[in-house]
Amino acid sequence: MSGDTAAELLLQHTRDVADFPKPGILFKDLTPLFMAPAAFEAVVQDIADRYRGKVDVVAGVEARGFIVGSPVALALGVAFVPVRKAGKLPGQVVSQEYDLEYGTATIEVHADAFAEYPRVLVLDDVLATGGTAAAACTLVERAGGGVTAVEMLLELGALEGRKLLSAYELHVIASV
């Protein structure tokens, strides 16, 4: 495993789950990555190496963006801000509704989340249609932050989600 790239490790530790969360969706399950400490650490370090000294905060999108974003923030020595589903944060929040490939959703952050952290890395797991990532970027900007980059582990290239993110620096570890 020591010679494998982050992309190879990620793909080796991703499994497909058919018809989840509804019929016709092929879900990319990253649980095998999270259960393989050496592979997970290599992916986290790959991301951290790319943004060292360039960001003040990692904004991880619920829920797998939390799992990856938190250790990336720790590796960088920067803050972590959770981008949550609606109704999960106390206090004053900023909300953003968006379309998914199978419905709509709303995400939120604390209204003051980026007051001290202007350079934001938006991090999530899978880039599909791009709706979630684009909404997270809009939310960061509405809450006073500036999106330095968007980082995704996997991209479902056929869905062309990167089109919604053309205004941002985007890095994807692996495309399928």
Image: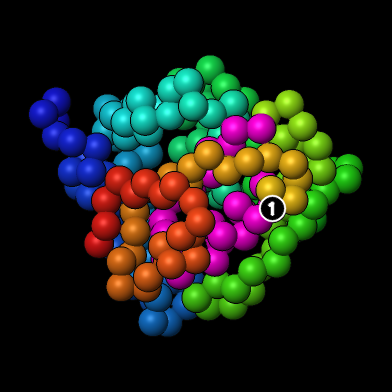
Magenta stretch: includes residue 31 = no
Amino acid beneath label 1? Leu
Magenta stretch: includes residue 132 = yes
**Camera-side residue of 44 and 39:** 44
Vertical position of residue 10 compared to residue 97: above or below: above
Residue 99 in percent (x, y) is at 60, 73
Q: Is residue 78 left or right of residue 9?
A: right
Q: Which residues are magenta?
A: 118-140
**Camera-side residue of 136 and 23:** 136
Q: Quadrant of residue 79?
A: top right
Name the residue carrying label 1.
139
Vertical position of residue 7 compared to residue 28: above or below: above
Check disc 1 and report its element: helix, strand or loop: helix
Q: Is residue 150 left or right of residue 146?
A: left
Q: Quadrant of residue 87?
A: bottom right
Q: Is residue 5 left or right of residue 154?
A: left
Can the viewer see residue 13?
A: no
Residue 114 in percent (x, y) is at 72, 35
Which residue lies at the image location 72% right of the left edge and 61% below the top edge?
Answer: 96
Which residue lies at the image location 37% right of the left edge and 39% below the top edge?
Answer: 34
